[in-house]
Amino acid sequence: MDMLRFATAGSVDDGKSTLIGRLLFDSKSIFEDQLESVEATSKSRGDEYTDLSLLTDGLRAEREQGITIDVAYRYFATPKRKFIIADTPGHAQYTRNMVTGASTADLAIVLVDARKGVLEQSRRHATIASLLRVPHIVLAVNKMDLVDWSQEVFEQIRDEFFAFASKLNITDMTAIPLSALKGDNVVDRSENMPWYDGGSLLHHLENVYIASDRNLQDVRFPVQYVIRPQQAAARDYRGYAGQVASGVMKPGDEVLVLPSGLTSTIAGIDTADGPVDEAFPPMSVTVRLTDEIDISRGDVICRPHNHPETTQDIDAMICWMDERPLTTGMKLAIQHTTRSARVVVKNIQYQLDVNTLHRAEGIHTLGLNDIGRVTLRTTTPLVADPYYRNRTTGAFVLIDDSSNRTVAAGTISQG
């Protein structure tokens, strides 16, 4: 059974937490004691209904303020597919949390309140999903019960959102009218909107085709750990452990190791359950080679005629996540796949307004939650692909050495 990772995004009070609560509740993915706790809390607050948003708004601060601050991950499964949900915050000041939640997602649900229409935040979230190359977007027009299930309202919001999204790099978009509170079109088809001939949200999540989203052409295997057993019987064993980022690897394949440029052949591929005939994403495996060559953590195993660039100059889009602004000349640490290095900010090319897509040039700082294009110089070469080709080898984070805080997430642009 395959797994779909999806992120929810939307403005405050658009009903993200209620929608996820409804998905969990109607697909029978919550325990009785969880439901009893939610019913008791709803009653104690004087609600006339069971507030399903409490299933996801776990932090007390969120319950008291009625907003979602952190990225909350939830897991559930149906007979067709497993799911991991990243419930991301709606506030503009939590843009960095949205970036975190969407960075590994196969699909993003952008919620819009049917009464309010497409807001600045809706455009912001669509832009971020596009920058992060989330392959599938669902526009969920929520609270349709409060606009009398109007087809006209739904189509107006859909057309406005799709017109904006057409300027972005989004390959697959779907719009679904629903009511998270009442359950219409969430798990079951709604009888209140006979004019809508599509499937429910859960039906779409269960059936959206994601196999073709995975890159099986470009072999990329960042080495995480070199295995040299100490036992006398296995002294001659030398394996390279890690997770396959992309491509398919098989014993007998000729491979290139970067940044050294040395070549060898795959002798075997081992897993916790024994040897396998092939490895593909997202399998964690140990690769054995026929030659004894010097390989260490951070090196990348790829194919001789299809390999990433080895470079110290990085052109990237970043989301700045720290109170202290990013400035030209700043020195930071970079974590890229399994390799760590030092980096200096050479240039800030422009700041991107994620609502209008306007590029502000000639600026020298990026503030908290700003998104911009920068030029970086690393102390040691990185083995990298453009992000559009590979979401693993094209992504990185920047870290402040003094505090050990992650201060930015970035995607490599060149290529």
Image: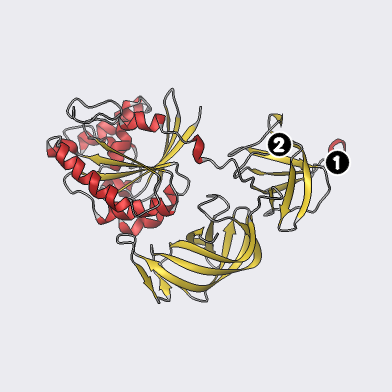
Q: Which residue is farthest front? A: 305
Give how far across and how far down residue 367 sits, in percent.
39, 69
The Cα atoms of the two marked residues, 1 and 2, are separated by 24 Å
Give how far across and how far down residue 140 sits, in percent.
28, 40
Secondary structure at numbered mark 2: loop
Secondary structure at numbered mark 1: loop
Q: Is residue 113 left or right of residue 356?
A: left
- The quarter of the picture where the C terminus appears is bottom right
Give how far across and how far down residue 210 sits, in percent.
47, 36
- Say if mark 1 contacts mark 2, CB within 8 Å: no
Name the front one of labels 1 and 2.
2
Kindly identify the residue that appears in the image at 48 percent across and 46 percent down: 104
Residue flagged by tag 2: what amino acid is it?
A: Lys
Whether residue 413 is visible, yes or no, is yes
Pick the residue in front: 69 or 357.
357
Q: Is residue 100 left or right of residue 294?
A: left
Give how far across and how far down residue 382 sits, in percent.
63, 60
Q: Is residue 415 above or below residue 215?
A: below
Q: Which residue is farthest right? A: 232
Q: Is residue 126 above or below residue 350?
A: above
Where is mark 1, residue-wise?
235
Residue 250 got which mark? Answer: 2
Residue flagged by tag 1: what amino acid is it?
A: Arg
Q: Quadrant of residue 109?
A: top left
Kindly identify the residue that appears in the image at 46 percent across and 49 percent down: 103
